[in-house]
Amino acid sequence: MLQWTFDTLLGLGLLWLASSALASPDLFRAIVLFVAFGLLMALAWARLDAPDVALAEAAIGAGLTGALLMAALARLQDNRIVAPDDDDDQSRSDHVSKNDPQKGIT
């Protein structure tokens, strides 16, 4: 009875983590939930007597992929483009080429 309860809670936890990771608007939170999902999935594979798959899931699914996603998030935050001011838009329109066929069209 205890094993059945643990397996049920494990399955419900996996479903909750998956839906939370997909629905999260915050990228950092989504990555953390994804890593937690990978660790719980590794535990689920171990409960299914597949230690080789569990080890691969923990190493690749939670560890390597989580680290790569964190590095990508850090790179995204470093390369944010700041919206130009209205003054910059006016100066850009002054530099439009005279041969531009779209110049007179608004």
Image: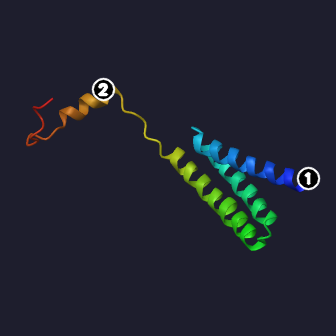
Q: Which mark is residue 87?
A: 2
Q: Is residue 46 above or below residue 39?
A: below
Q: Under tag 1, what secondary structure?
A: helix
Colour scheme in use = rainbow
Is 18 placed left or right of 80 in the picture? right
Q: Residue furthest bottom?
A: 52
Locate residue 93: give its quadrant: top left
Query: Considering depth in this image, is 24 or 97 the residue closer to the camera?
Result: 24
Residue type, mark 1 in image: Leu
The residue tagged 1 is 2
Q: Estimate how packed mark 2 is, as few (under 14), some (14 to 19) or many (20 or more) residues with alpha carbons within 10 Å.
A: few
Residue type, mark 2 in image: Asp
Q: Position of residue 48 (x, y in %)?
A: 78, 66
Q: Residue furthest top?
A: 86
Q: Estimate how packed mark 1 is, as few (under 14), some (14 to 19) or many (20 or more) residues with alpha carbons within 10 Å.
A: few
Count numbered badges in the picture.
2
Q: Nearer the viewer, mark 1 or mark 2?
A: 1
Q: Position of residue 73 (x, y in %)?
A: 56, 49
Is 89 placed left or right of 37 in the picture? left
